[in-house]
Amino acid sequence: MANQAVFSKKKVVLVADDDPSILYAVKRVLANSCSVIEASNGEEAVDLSRRHKPDIVLMDMMMPKKDGITACAEIKANKATSAIPVVMLTGVGYELNKELATSLGASGYITKPFKPQELIDAIDQFSKS
């Protein structure tokens, strides 16, 4: 009997951040366990979430074209993407911002600078599938 490799589907993670160094850092942390799609602004994040239906979105709050709060609200308001968990990944750690993000549908909130394990834990905790 031949050995058969068991392939598990990698989770698809959409990372939305206008800082290329953050995109690079997140991609490096998740490269072995996830497929990473990158967006450099909120508008692109909304579009990519509709097209790819990722397992989870890691979203910066302050981005050009559309901020992360607005993008999160749009993802959550769209029937096709409303079940996708959105975790805010931001340098803004104010409690009021956390409450606003949660009220608009965000599942979690990670403050930059983050530890790699925080990303992994959020994906394990919140992602579908």
Image (tube, rainbow, N blue to C red):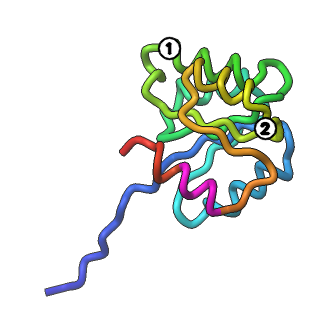
Residue at the far bottom in the pictured view: 1
| Quarter of the rendering occupied by the N terminus | bottom left
- Could you say where residue 104 lies in the image, as x and y percent from the top left? 59, 18
> Callout 1: few (<14), some (14-19), or many (20+) C-alpha neighbours within 10 Å?
few
Q: Nearer the viewer, residue 97 or 116?
A: 97
Asked if residue 102 is among those painted magenta in the image, a careful observer would answer: no
Task: Locate residue 70: give its quadrant.
Answer: top right
| Element on which disc 1 rests | loop
At horizontal 68% and vertical 62% (from top left) the residue drawn is 116
Magenta part of the chain: 117-122
- Could you say where residue 107 lies in the image, as x and y percent from the top left? 53, 34
| Quarter of the rendering occupied by the C terminus | top left
At horizontal 76% and vertical 58% (from top left) the residue drawn is 25
Cα–Cα span, label 1 and label 2:
27 Å
Amino acid at the residue labelled 2: Gly
Q: Nearer the viewer, residue 107 or 59?
A: 107
Any mark on residue 93, and which? Answer: 2
- Could you say where residue 52 lies in the image, as x and y percent from the top left? 52, 33
Report the side of 56 relative to 94 (left or right). left
Tell me, yes or no, whether the two marked residues, 1 and 2, touch with CB atoms within 8 Å: no
Q: Can you say whether 95 is above or below 32 in the image?
A: above
| Element on which disc 2 rests | loop
Q: Nearer the viewer, residue 55 or 9?
A: 55
Asked if residue 119 is among those painted magenta in the image, a careful observer would answer: yes
- Could you say where residue 93 lies in the image, as x and y percent from the top left? 78, 38
Any mark on residue 78, and which? Answer: 1
